[in-house]
Image (spheres, rainbow, N blue to C red):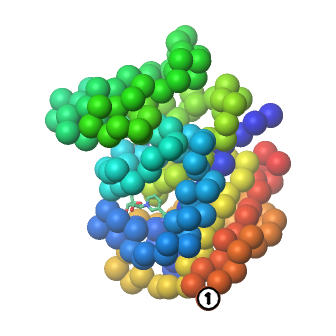
Amino acid sequence: MKHLKAIAAMSRDRVIGRQGAIPWHLPEDFKWFKQQTTGNVAVMGRKTYESLPGRLPNRRIMVLTRHPRRLLRERPEVYGAFREWRGGGSICTPYQLGFPRVAPNPGRDLLLFNSLDRLRPERFSCEIFICGGAEVYAQALPLCSDLFLTVVNLEIPDGDAFFPPFEQDFEWVADLRVTGEFRIRHFRNRRLA
Ligand SMILES: NC(=O)c1ccc[n+]([C@@H]2O[C@H](COP(=O)([O-])OP(=O)(O)OC[C@H]3O[C@@H](n4cnc5c(N)ncnc54)[C@H](OP(=O)(O)O)[C@@H]3O)[C@@H](O)[C@H]2O)c1
């Protein structure tokens, strides 16, 4: 059975964000993120998406929000025309038709949706990566078979978004890359592996 995968980066003290942004600049780790997600689907919370405008070409993005209509009304410059998907009976349609192009961000494929529970990775031919932020990781990790976690050699005392506890449910598989600045660690969900 195919499951979701999660990709994230946290500091030694579990920080993933500060004031709506990632509090480090590590081009090598971003390259890793890009390699993994290019050609696949990146699922992210609305706050994370809004922190990254224009920076994720060549992959389909699913943005989780509880207020798709309000986003269109209040942030047309960010969301432009979008196709709303509520899951349920028409759940196959977005996968079969592909994602719509979003007017203000040419080259980006964006779909707003409001139900993590109804995401069915087995319906996609590519991988589905959960890309944060904190609120979304906390809900989605139990649904993920694999976690690719970059542990950054920093402490961020004023961080305000944190990676949730996962150690009980996931076992370490391998360190895929170790540098002076970070270590990319692969974990597998004991229940789903
Ligand atoms: N280091 C990393 O790897 C990494 C990765 C990603 C993000 N980040 C950081 O994480 C921080 C953002 O995290 P966050 O927790 O504040 O926000 P977030 O998880 O990015 O987004 C939260 C929003 O997602 C929507 N949402 C969440 N669960 C939902 C559900 N079950 N159904 C429908 N919609 C749902 C809601 O949007 P609405 O309010 O529109 O309803 C909610 O306000 C930023 O600092 C960012 O830079 C770090």
How many numbered marks are there? 1
Q: Quadrant of residue 174?
A: bottom right
> From where the camera sits, is residue 48 visible?
no
With respect to residue 127, does 171 lie above or below?
below
Residue most extreme to the front: 107
- Residue found at the very far top of the displayed protein: 89
Residue 136, horizontal then vertical, whole percent? 48, 49
**Amino acid of disc 1:** Gly
Is residue 34 visible from the viewing direction of this image?
A: yes
Instruction: Specify the quadrant of the image occupied by residue 71.
Output: top left
- Between 22 and 171, the residue placed more toward the observer is 22
Viewport quadrant of the N terminus: top right
Q: Which residue is mark 1?
A: 180
SS for callout 1: loop
Image point (55%, 79%), residue name: 152
Q: Is residue 173 left or right of residue 42?
A: right
Q: Name the residue rendered at 71%, 40% in the picture.
A: 3
From this view, report whether residue 48 is shown above or below residue 23: above
Image coords of residue 117 (percent x, y): 56, 32
Residue 91 rendering spot, x and y as whole percentages? 55, 18
Quarter of image, res 159: bottom left
Q: Which residue is at a point 41% across and 39% down the rendered structure image? A: 108
Is residue 138 placed above or below 73 in the rendered structure?
Answer: below
- Residue 13 position, x and y percent, is 51, 79
33 left or right of 99 in image: right
Residue at the spot x=82%, y=48% of the render? 193
